[in-house]
Image: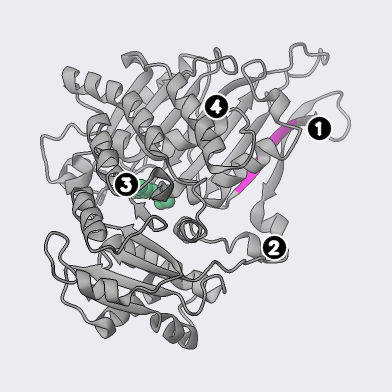
């Protein structure tokens, strides 16, 4: 496979919150990898801005440590690392006051792409946007990147959208959902819309049900303060899971164009039926062996926040009547795996009297680990013994099919940051999409909060609460096993 790295235009990127966790783990190592790949121009500038009193060299030294820890690929190449660090500088800045803003303005160049990454608490978005406008640092061509959590309900999301809209047009705002930057998530669109094979079957007549699982082995350690106020519903379902659901269920956009794709996703969100209490299971992990319980991790013995959620969802439109979408996500589960399983209906009639009934075809789209796709088909078991049917996988692991480059794919953040510089919003959430997602999740969360029901316990390292298994069993279906 030939690698086709297309360099982006020259840019100045200002990272607010440059000494924070996300910048250290994802943004700076991601930029370094794009630099090494030859995608980031040698003249591009990255300016860190945060409260800490660092100078340029101090920031470069911190960044070098972050890259050594998080950039992967057996550690950085020292010559390339030096060249990358040369592109970095740092401005101590007061988001609410005047310190640092003139300095920041003086460092920016004219005639290059200008982007501002708000890797800070949403409560600071307004202050940053106002200062960028007041000091005439951001203009009509500048871009602003914002991270989740984008609000904690519809009302707060609307307020954030309104705050940003005071200073930026929608076409300048890049709301990150890093799941949209994952290779296989984009591949979902390629598989659906670049092949004739699947689309004719992609509807309630041929699809029995769809499962979307995002299972994690990590707990909430270190993030208890944030997580305990959010839970799996706000942390994973409202954003990542709903984006996956939309990409699986949406109509073909007329073009692979930001608004065309986002219009179709929005239609799915608006067609989601409310979820009844019987169709949803919340769970909370219990201690197991050395592993602490959720309550210990959260430091809140009274917490009723869910670290797991499973639900059955229906989409009220012409394509999907009667085809349920089962969503499941949780922390401290048996394995780290994210996959989408499309189970087709059984053939309407079996001609093989003696054999077993054919097992329905499944298309398994694996997001992580080992990105790839598997389609199961029925064949005749080889050899004598009559017409015995057996299910076999048609396996397409990207690593096998595409060679080493198939596995060395850019991390979601790398891809998304380069898209910001290119000015391509396809993989970013539009304001109305975020609001529609909150409108739907809000009704579920409100019902829980009114009922004050406790989440179901599950053992750390398991597949989640028993009730989640029953959610499927009662429909004569079963979850695909969670395995790495
Ligand atoms: C984040 C959530 O958005 O996604 C985390 O806040 C979660 O709780 C993470 O662990 C999962 O991302 P990934 O890329 O590791 O699947």
Near-viewer residue (29 or 378)? 29
Near-viewer residue (99 or 42)? 99
Q: Which mark is residue 210?
A: 4
Disc 3 designates what residue?
148
Disc 3 to disc 4, how far (Cα)? 26 Å
Residue 57 coordinates in the image, percent (x, y): 28, 85
- Residue found 45% across the figure and 78% down from its top: 75
Mark earlier in primary sequence (2, 1): 1
Quick check: 249 left or right of 373?
left
Tell me the magenta residue range. 372-377
- Residue found 17% across the figure and 18% down from its top: 450
User: Can residue 457 be seen from the camera position used here?
Assistant: no
Mark earlier in primary sequence (2, 3): 3
Quick check: 349 left or right of 90?
right
Identify the secondary structure beneath mark 1: loop
The residue carrying mark 3 has its beta carbon less than 8 Å from ligand 1: yes
**Mark 2 or mark 1: which is in front?**
2
Q: Which mark is residue 381?
A: 1
Disc 2 designates what residue?
403
Mark earlier in primary sequence (3, 4): 3
**Mark 3 or mark 1: which is in front?**
3
The residue carrying mark 2 has its beta carbon less than 8 Å from ligand 1: no
Q: Label 1 crowding class (10 Å Cα cut-off): few <14, some 14-19, many 20+? A: some
Identify the secondary structure beneath mark 2: loop
Disc 2 to disc 3, how far (Cα)? 34 Å
Q: Which mark is residue 135?
A: none
């Amino acid at each position: 496979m030939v690698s086709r790295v297309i360099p982006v235009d020259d840019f100045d990127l200002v990272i607010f919150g440059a000494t924070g966790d996300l910048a250290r783990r994802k943004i700076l190592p991601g930029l370094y990898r794009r630099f090494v790949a030859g995608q980031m121009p040698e003249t591009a500038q990255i300016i860190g801005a945060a409260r800490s009193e660092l100078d340029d060299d101090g920031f470069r030294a911190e960044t070098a440590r972050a890259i050594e820890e998080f950039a992967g690929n057996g550690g950085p190449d020292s010559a390339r690392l030096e060249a990358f660090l040369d592109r970095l500088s740092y401005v101590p800045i007061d988001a609410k006051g005047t310190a640092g803003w003139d300095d920041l303005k003086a460092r920016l160049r004219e005639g290059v792409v200008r982007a501002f990454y708000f890797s800070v608490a949403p409560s600071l978005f307004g202050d940053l946007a106002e200062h960028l406008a007041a000091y005439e640092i951001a203009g009509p061509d500048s871009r602003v990147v914002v991270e989740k959590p984008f609000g904690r309900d519809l009302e707060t999301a609307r307020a954030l959208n309104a705050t940003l809209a005071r200073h930026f047009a929608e076409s300048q705002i890049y709301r990150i959902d890093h799941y949209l930057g994952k290779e296989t998530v984009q591949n979902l669109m390629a598989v659906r819309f670049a092949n004739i094979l699947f689309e004719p079957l992609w509807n309630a007549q041929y699809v029995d049900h769809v499962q979307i699982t995002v299972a994690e082995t990590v707990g909430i350690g270190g993030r208890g303060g944030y997580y305990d106020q959010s839970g799996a519903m706000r942390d994973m379902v409202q954003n990542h899971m709903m984006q996956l659901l939309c990409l699986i269920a949406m109509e073909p956009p007329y073009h692979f164009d930001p608004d065309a794709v986002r219009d179709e996703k929005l239609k799915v969100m608006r067609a989601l039926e409310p979820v009844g209490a019987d169709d949803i299971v919340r769970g909370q992990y219990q201690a197991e062996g050395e592993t602490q319980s959720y309550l210990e991790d959260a430091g809140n013995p009274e917490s009723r926040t869910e670290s797991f959620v499973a639900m059955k969802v229906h989409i009220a439109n012409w394509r999907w009547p009667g085809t349920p979408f089962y969503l499941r996500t949780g922390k401290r589960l048996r394995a780290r795996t994210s996959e989408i399983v499309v189970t087709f209906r059984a053939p309407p009639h079996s001609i093989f009297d003696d054999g077993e009934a054919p097992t329905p075809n499944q298309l398994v789209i694996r997001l992580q680990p080992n990105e790839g796709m598997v389609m199961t088909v029925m064949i005749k078991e080889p050899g004598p013994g009559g017409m015995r049917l057996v299910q076999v996988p048609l396996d397409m692991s990207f690593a096998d099919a595409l060679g080493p480059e198939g596995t060395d794919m850019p991390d979601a953040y790398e891809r998304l940051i380069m898209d910001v510089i290119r000015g391509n919003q396809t993989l970013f959430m539009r304001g109305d999409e975020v609001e529609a997602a909150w409108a739907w999740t809000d009704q579920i969360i409100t019902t829980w909060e009114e009922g004050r029901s406790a989440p179901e316990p599950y053992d750390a390292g398991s597949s989640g609460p028993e009730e989640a298994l029953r959610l499927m069993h009662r429909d004569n279906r079963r979850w695909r096993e969670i395995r790495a």
